Amino acid sequence: MAEISLSRVSKRYGNVEVIRDVSLDIASGELVVFLGPSGSGKTTLLRMIAGLERIDQGTLTIGGVRCEALAPGKRGVAMVFQNYALYPHMTVAENMAFGLRNVGVPSMEIRARIAEAARMLEMEALLDRRPSQLSGGQRQRVAIGRAIVKQPKAFLFDEPLSNLDAALRSRTRVELAELHQRLRSTMIYVTHDQVEAMTLADRIVVLNDRRIEQVGTPMQVYSRPASRFVATFVGSPAMNILPVSLTTNDGSMQARLPDGSSLALPQAPAGDWNELGVRPEALVVVREGGDTRGRAAVVERLGERTLVHVRLADGTQVIAQDVGLSAVEPGDEVKLRFDSSALHLFARDGSAWHAH
């Protein structure tokens, strides 16, 4: 295990800046997920830590050792690639042993490490097979096993589940979480899949436009997004964003929605707020009362809950939540209530205020 520290790291390809002034400290044994859309810089940042991309500016420290000038093999990290990167002419055991033989690890030690990794990943029966004889999930296990036998200071995962089907991706995600609990190794995991990020991470690093937007635990990022981008990128379905105009009445802030309805925001500070955010679970269908109303356009029945896509009087569409056995049908008029303790305001510069 080792702590990893990035200080004011930047990267350019010619005149194009791909990482801008990134600083981050990762604790020993922590599983940190780099989350962001395509082009946000998350994979480039991971490759810079691995030594596969040069750091143009700033410093990288792994386990207390400055590493930005070290070759990849000298950094003490192991990378698991999206495409597995297995040698097709070698067996599973030979793939796992290859890197160890190259650095002179004794044969008995290699066999012991392979046996332990195979036991841990439940793939003892696969050791004599070649990659062409394996499923996608089995190949991914081999790639992870090859990293484990190196006994690295840190593991680096570059979208390792993206080539798997949905069911296998879900199962492998759980296996990775269990692996981290057993090894307690430092791990950095790159993904654009927020479900992977929310379920695996000790902390999430949200990247956008070559820089860090927010660092926090999954629930901090979800419930207190630092910016409008984080609010809309993290969460499925995405947070509802509504344009609002704010007024003050007897010292209390009132938010006027596009359909003319109003919400009290007694704790909101003065500011250049122009949008209101509310997640679907904080905008619920009610039988009586309610803060606004609209007409159900689409009803998604998900078992434990129902998502209702509602078109408000002004044409704005929002996603609200109802109980699993909802009686709402498309075309029905529905009443909606906002949870005032779970509202968010966003300013024109992207900054945010949270009701809780």
Image (spheres, helix red, strand yellow):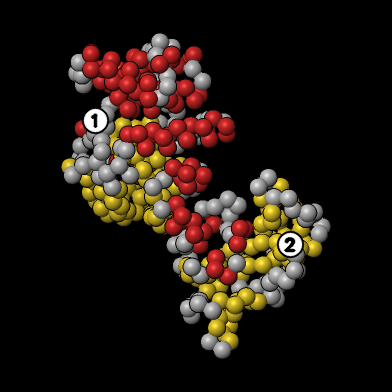
Q: Helix, strand or loop at disc 1?
A: helix
Mark 1 vs 2, N-terminal side:
1
Q: Is residue 324 left or right of residue 210?
A: right
Q: Helix, strand or loop at disc 2?
A: strand
Question: Residue 311's mark?
Answer: 2
Position of 20 relative to 150 (above/below): below
Q: CA distance from mark 1 to mark 2?
A: 57 Å
Q: Is residue 283 left or right of residue 349?
A: right
Residue 135 image offset from top left, x and y in percent:
51, 20
Q: Residue 295: which quarter of the image?
A: bottom right
The residue drawn where x is 75% and y is 68% is 288
Residue 12, visible in the rendered structure: yes
Q: Residue 215: which quarter of the image?
A: bottom left
Out of 78 and 267, give the one closest to the viewer. Answer: 267
Out of 45 and 249, give the one closest to the viewer. Answer: 249
Residue 89, visible in the rendered structure: no
Position of 176 relative to 35 (above/below): above
Residue 319 image offset from top left, x and y in percent:
66, 58
User: Of discs 1 and 2, which sits in the foreground?
Assistant: 2
Total labels: the figure holds 2
Q: Name the residue at the bottom extreme.
A: 250
Residue 231 image offset from top left, x and y in percent:
51, 59
Question: Residue 73's mark?
Answer: 1
Position of 212 relative to 189 (above/below): below
Three-letter code for the amino acid on which mark 2 is drawn: Arg
Q: Is residue 174 left or right of residue 53?
A: right
Position of 207 relative to 87 (above/below): below
